[in-house]
Image (tube, grey):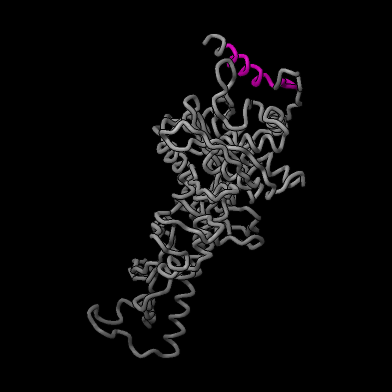
Amino acid sequence: MFLHIFFLLWASHLFATGNDSLTFSSDSVKTAVVHPKEFKTNIQPDMLSENSASQIRAGLIYDCNAKTIVWEKDMKYAYPIASLTKMMVALLTIEDIKAGNVDWLDKIETERSYRASRRSRRVIKVKEAYTLEGLLKMAMIPSNNEACALIGKYLGGSVDTFVKRMNTRAAELGMTQTFYSNPSGLPAGYGNLDNSSSPNDLLRLATELIKYPEILAITNIAFAEVENGRGSVIYRNHNHLVMDYPGEVDGLKTGYTKNAKFCLVATAQKDNHRLIAIALGASNPWLRNQIVGEMLNNYYVHLGCGPMGNEKIDPLIVKADSRTTNAIASSNTPVMRQEVVYKTVTSIHKKTHVVKSGQTLSDIASRYNCSVNELKKWNGLRSSKIYANQKLAVRTHVKKQVPVMVNVVENYDACEDDAEDCSPPATAETKTKAVNAKNTIAKTESNSVDKFIYYQVQAGDTLWKISQQYPGTTVEQIKKLNNIQNARDLKTGSKIKVAVDG
């Protein structure tokens, strides 16, 4: 035990000193360490409750659009990371594919041993053949450890050589608090160091991975079917947030060992705004998922996007009900008042459909009045195969009446409150006065802010990001001034009004 503690202290000191080179193996192979710029930080309050923050060892929230860390806890301290290790395996795989060294469809053969039955001692050996894509799916979705060893042998010639590559690449990325002893994240054994990293280092790795849509196309799959040369096997994603928030959470990796506890590096995109959330050392998987979900949702609410998985109202399908038509009373002294009217709003509700035996995607699409392609997109499906008892995310349209406050221009003296028709016959003069009054009110509303400037929307802008550039400006002000609902209404290159002080 003393020897193990000594090794941990020695390694922690080595990684913290920022030496120009690190030694990763007994044959003294040295790798130059890159020291990239620190991530920008702009810590926001209340991004995670004190109770939730106390139940993880370390973590952070990163706004990819603003390139800023907005919440963190012990982000530069190294902890065991278990299967988060496999993120580096994925990065080396996709980089080798992009370099033309290997291909997704490369066949990798292996021999596996199975017991003839639970009670039998007889062992059956069979040969199986996987594609490189299939192995990476097994590594990233069900966190298969053997798949990582096979990838390591195929890409590196041997597992040991591949592990050296992992450490070399980590050093190149400036991951100074990271050490790998194997490609799977399994405990290293007595006298050896477990794979370890810090949230800050894991963020460097995650920002590299999300550059590749091919990786996200794998990590957002709820159920993956992998061919092994003898048949196919269905694997379920260990990252349950992918199923809880389909179409929003699309990665990246879970991890668990006794020392690491439950860990998760998650990424989500809502309203074209991508976030990365990291949590290390939760006591159980449900708590881990809850905390990471809280991280993402709290910040999306802070941005004005609303929480993930929330009921969405599409402004394109909001139609005015007949009760919203209000005549402007004609008089010489028109005034404005507010009135509650109702609109028919079509809202989109998310629900889960449990596949019944014999059902096809076409059957389900017909039931929920959507297309097969939409079903595939919502569930990250790459084929039309589905299975009995499989859970699919579906969306339904529900119409309902919602109260809305509107401004009405009328003459209070025109008639009695209980009269059925209190509007006198309209003349050209009264019509002109009513229109002028309405225009005056609209102009007054649009100029409720003393001074404003025109801002040209840049790629990646959000309402919150724009508001931060002008002190005293709020997201709600920008929405009201430009009559927009959320970041989806921002179009790159367009100009919007932004309030300024003075």
Is residue 129 a member of the stretch shown in magenta? no
* Front-most of residues 427 and 386: 386
Q: Is residue 390 above or below residue 72?
A: below
Q: Position of residue 362 (x, y in %)?
A: 47, 68
Above or below, 145 against 230 in this view is above
In this view, the residue in front, 486 or 248, is 248
User: Is residue 8 within the magenta segment?
Assistant: yes
Instruction: Indicate the position of residue 34 as horizontal and vertical percent values.
Output: 73, 30
Look at the picture and state if 405 lies above or below 308: below
- The spot of residue 43 in percent (x, y) is 54, 36
The secondary structure that most of the magenta stretch takes on is helix
Query: Can the viewer see residue 167?
Result: yes
Does residue 465 appear to the left or right of 332 in the view shown? Answer: right
The quarter holding residue 166 reads top right
Q: Nearer the viewer, residue 250 or 235?
A: 235
Q: Considering depth in this image, is 130 or 424 the residue closer to the camera?
A: 130
x 37%, y 71%: residue: 344
For the question of whether residue 36 can be seen, the reply is: no
View extreme (top): residue: 2
Which stretch appears magenta? 6-23
